[in-house]
Image (tube, helix red, strand yellow):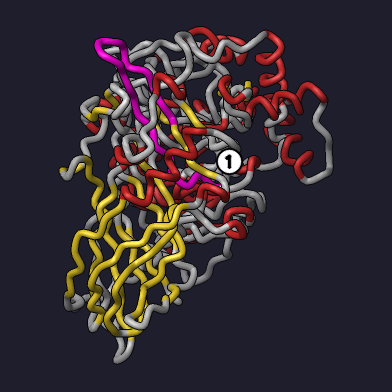
């Protein structure tokens, strides 16, 4: 059964999707509360136990779709999986090649079957709903997926808001949802379904934040997870089933930009534990373009006075980060943010600390014209390179013309090849090395939740830095004081919940990339652990995974902090470690 997954509310139906005997069933989920559209990040929803709460994240996996036929039998839709996310406006999926007919019910599961849940997650296509880099719901080394991530804040009376993070997971908590209704599939149709995340909290088995706790990781015997699983089926409802005629349009194929007549494909290398990346189809990796991109990355001609290059602020010895707190641009000018490492960018979909650019090719060009960095005009760079590098551009693009677009494409090609996946930790996972007892203890703390009520006393790092990439690429307020001078992601989105939120960096090679945080305020890993242990500042946009902890942070012991730091140092890739020693 062919399944087509669609992100966002807008999508096109392809000509020829239907046949004489088969149709396409589109699924659209409306996120609601109290019969009205769900309003995110608003402490407006009353719990049955007297608290008020908000929803900042409702992200979940649906699987095992089936349609009930008039004779009572069920038509299973093979391999039917969808990922939905209220905050990301992910609300659509489509299931093709369904036999025409009338059906009387739709059923599906929230969560995955045991086999799929336990299977390795690294092999899914880059746009598949089970690709961890797509959904951010895989627990990686812990195994399995979070079926539903429900997060937000709660308060009681006039008390200050506290975060909650309810993660429903594990095979026993897979929930069956059955929605009776009339499904006329004589042609393509859309099933409009409502999902009320607040009903998971205030359903027939109401959850009390103050009495039961602000977090769950669905350990066996956890009453919060049991209540969520009991409430979930009634949180879904069938709204309507509408028939429609496919639009007369076809998907426009993506063509590579200016490929030369003769080129050499570049062999992209990554760990087999990494999720598959979404490499740009219009800018395929070829040796000639990668080599040009590397030369441009190291060429000071991109700056106004020929004094700095991209590599100046992103030296390989520092894992392509900057050992200075703020990079020095033309005429000694200083920026206000720390230069991010340029590794494993193939898995990112937005760039800079605030995510203001959607592609590497766009990101590569902005520093050239930034007054605090290279302070040069793109047309001047084009003119310089036309004189010195026309032959290189001809090898990479098939003609000697230099353009700003080609400069961006070449640098993007090169940056996509900068992968890091061979640390001592990776070798230990492959059985080629062994972590020390302290490093192993740090790894266990890193991957373990801190949930005292269930006897789990980890460091809770994996929520933001889990997975093989050691980042989920999301934007979070991590407990630093919010500065009006730099509001982070909110400057891009204009959304209040993004005040003080910055990109979650990867922790690979973290020992080489000091100083830390978006403004480089912490010079050592010890200072970083002290912040998460005792220095977290509670604000109204603090990420729920931190806001659920007591004031100040996790309150780690000295032994726990030392063990986590020992593990973090084991994430250093030997290639960059050797470069740092030189």
Is residue 148 inside the magenta stretch?
A: yes
Please name whichever residue, 318 or 371, is drawn nearer the observer in this view of the structure. Answer: 318
Instruction: Tell me residue 406's x, y (percent).
Output: 38, 52
428 to the left or right of 313 = right
User: In front: 543, or 274?
Assistant: 543
- Residue 529 in magenta? no
Q: In the rendered image of this protein, does residue 1 appear above or below residue 151?
A: below
Q: Which residue is mark 1?
A: 467
**Magenta segment, prevailing SS (helix, strand or loop):** strand
User: Picture coordinates of residue 323 (x, y %)?
Assistant: 56, 19
- The reply to whether residue 429 is visible in this rendering is yes
Q: Residue at x 57, y 10 (%)?
A: 555
Q: Is residue 328 visible?
A: no
348 up-or-down from 20: above or below: above
| Horizontal and vertical percent position of residue 252 | 29, 71
Span of residues in magenta: 145-165
**Figure check: 486 above or below 505:** above
Q: Residue at x 34, y 44 (%)?
A: 358
Q: Give the left or right position of residue 276, taking residue 175 as reference.
A: right
Say which of 297 and 120 sits in front: 120
Identify the element where label 1 is drawn. Answer: loop
């Amino acid at each position: 059964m062919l399944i087509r997954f669609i992100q966002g509310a807008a999508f096109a139906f392809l000509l020829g999707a239907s046949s004489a005997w088969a149709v396409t069933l589109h699924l659209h989920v409306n996120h609601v509360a109290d019969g009205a559209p769900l309003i995110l990040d608003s402490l407006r929803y009353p719990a049955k136990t007297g608290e008020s709460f908000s929803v900042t994240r409702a992200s979940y996996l649906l699987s095992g779709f089936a349609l009930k036929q008039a004779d009572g039998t069920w038509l299973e839709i093979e391999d039917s999986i969808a990922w939905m996310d209220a905050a990301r406006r992910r609300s659509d999926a489509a299931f093709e090649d369904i036999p025409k007919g009338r059906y009387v019910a739709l059923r599906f599961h929230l969560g995955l079957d045991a086999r799929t849940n336990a299977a390795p997650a690294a092999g899914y296509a880059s746009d598949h709903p089970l690709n961890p880099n797509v959904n951010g719901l895989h627990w990686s080394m812990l195994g399995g997926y979070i079926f539903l991530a429900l997060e937000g804040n709660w308060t009681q009376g006039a008390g200050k808001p506290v975060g909650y993070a309810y993660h429903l997971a594990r095979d026993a908590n897979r929930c069956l949802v059955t929605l009776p209704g009339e499904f006329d599939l004589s042609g393509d149709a859309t099933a409009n379904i409502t999902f009320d995340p607040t009903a998971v909290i205030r359903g027939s088995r109401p959850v009390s934040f103050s009495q039961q706790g602000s977090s769950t990781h669905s350990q066996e015997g956890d009453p919060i997870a049991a209540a969520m699983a009991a409430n979930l089926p009634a949180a879904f409802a069938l709204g309507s089933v509408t028939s429609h005629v496919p639009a007369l349009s076809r998907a426009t194929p993506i063509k590579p930009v200016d490929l030369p007549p003769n080129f050499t494909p570049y062999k992209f290398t990554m760990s087999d534990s990494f999720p598959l990346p979404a490499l740009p189809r219009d800018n395929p990796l070829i040796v000639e373009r990668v080599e040009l991109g590397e030369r441009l990355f190291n060429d000071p001609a991109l700056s106004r006075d020929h004094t700095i290059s991209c590599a100046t602020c992103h030296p390989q010895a520092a894992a392509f980060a900057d050992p200075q707190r703020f990079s020095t641009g033309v005429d000694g000018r200083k920026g206000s943010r720390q230069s991010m490492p340029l590794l494993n960018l193939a898995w990112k979909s937005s760039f800079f600390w605030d995510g203001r650019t959607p592609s590497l090719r766009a990101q590569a060009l902005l520093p050239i014209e930034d007054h605090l960095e290279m302070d040069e005009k793109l047309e001047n760079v084009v003119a310089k390179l036309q004189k010195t590098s026309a032959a290189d551009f001809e090898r990479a693009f098939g003609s000697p013309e230099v353009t700003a677009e080609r400069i961006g494409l070449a640098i993007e090609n090169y940056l996509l090849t900068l992968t890091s996946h061979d640390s001592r930790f990776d070798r230990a996972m492959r059985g080629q090395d062994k972590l020390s007892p302290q490093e192993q203890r740090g790894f266990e703390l890193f991957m373990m939740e801190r949930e005292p009520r269930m006897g789990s006393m980890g460091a809770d790092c994996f929520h933001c830095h889990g997975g093989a990439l050691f980042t989920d690429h999301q934007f979070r307020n991590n407990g630093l004081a919010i500065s009006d001078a730099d509001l982070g992601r909110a400057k891009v989105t204009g959304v209040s919940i993004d005040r003080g939120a910055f990109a979650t960096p990867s922790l690979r090679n973290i020992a080489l990339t000091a100083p830390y945080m978006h403004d480089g305020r912490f010079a050592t890993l010890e200072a970083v652990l002290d912040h998460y242990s005792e220095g977290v500042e509670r604000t109204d946009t603090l990420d729920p995974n931190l806001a659920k902890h007591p004031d100040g942070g996790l309150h780690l012991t000295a032994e726990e902090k030392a063990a986590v730091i020992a593990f973090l140092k084991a994430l250093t890739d030997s290639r960059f470690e050797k470069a740092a020693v030189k």
